[in-house]
Image (tube, rainbow, N blue to C red):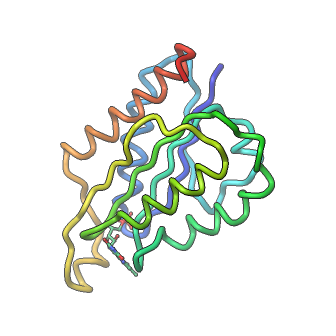
Amino acid sequence: MKKLLIVYHSLTGGSAQMAQAAAAGAASSTGVAVQLQSASQTAPEHLLAADGYLFACPENLASMAGLMKDFFDRCYYPVLGRLNGRPYAVMICAGSDGSNAARQIERIATGWRLEQIAPTIIVCTHAQTPERILQAKQIGSEELAQCRELGATMASGLEMGIF
Ligand SMILES: Cc1cc2nc3c(=O)[nH]c(=O)nc-3n(C[C@H](O)[C@H](O)[C@H](O)COP(=O)(O)O)c2cc1C
């Protein structure tokens, strides 16, 4: 059975909802095992054991969130050259931008020689004040539907051997 690994980090819940929506979409493919886990619990062996990847995290301080970066820092060299050609996609939760976090993850994925199967989804929560930025987030149904669709696309592609 093919395996889809969804790696995420979330401070106020937005990226977690996006990752969960993608996992729910992927679950429609019965021939694919979906593993949803936090970046801090993800190790090189999890990457090696999977056939495709979704990465989800917030943009913090014009960068991917630190714990997501820690995941890539820990895993980059142990798996370098051993994931070539596997499919991936990215979901970013941001206040108003998200483009730097997207670019950073896509660059790392290029280093791993992964194949991007869909454009990165960036969801902006439009929180502007410190209080609202630190509040728990509720991602809208349309954005969650996009994430579900991405998970379904990835899983069906894996199941049919397209990726
Ligand atoms: C310390 C900090 C820094 C942030 N920096 C950015 C930023 O550079 N660009 C941006 O668009 N949003 C920024 N945000 C907003 C978050 O990306 C936004 O609140 C997002 O919804 C968080 O995702 P999460 O709910 O998964 O934690 C920042 C939030 C925090 C807490």
Looking at the picture, tell me which residue is in the foreground, 113 or 160.
Answer: 113
**Identity of the residue furthest to the right in this view:** 78
State the residue at coordinates (42%, 47%). 19
Residue 69 sits in quarter: bottom right
Q: In this view, does 82 lie to the left or right of 109?
A: right
Q: In this view, does 137 lie to the left or right of 81?
A: left
Of residue 52 and residue 39, the one placed in the foreground of this image is: 52
> Can you give x and y, in whole percent of width and height, for residue 59 in the image?
40, 69
The reply, left or right, for residue 59 in relation to residue 111 is: left
- Against 113, residue 138 (above or below) is below
Q: Is residue 98 above or below residue 130?
A: above
Image quarter where the N terminus lies is: top right
Identity of the residue drawn at 28% across and 74% down: 135
Rendered view: 16 above or below 84:
below
Rendered location of residue 80, percent (x, y): 76, 50
| Total numbered badges shown on the rendered structure | 0
Quadrant field for ligand 1: bottom left
Q: In which quarter of the image is residue 93?
A: bottom left
Left or right: where 45 falls relative to 101: right
Residue 113 at x, y percent in the picture: 64, 43
Q: Where is residue 140 in the image (x, y as percent from the top left)?
A: 19, 51
Residue at x 22% of width, y 78% of height: 132
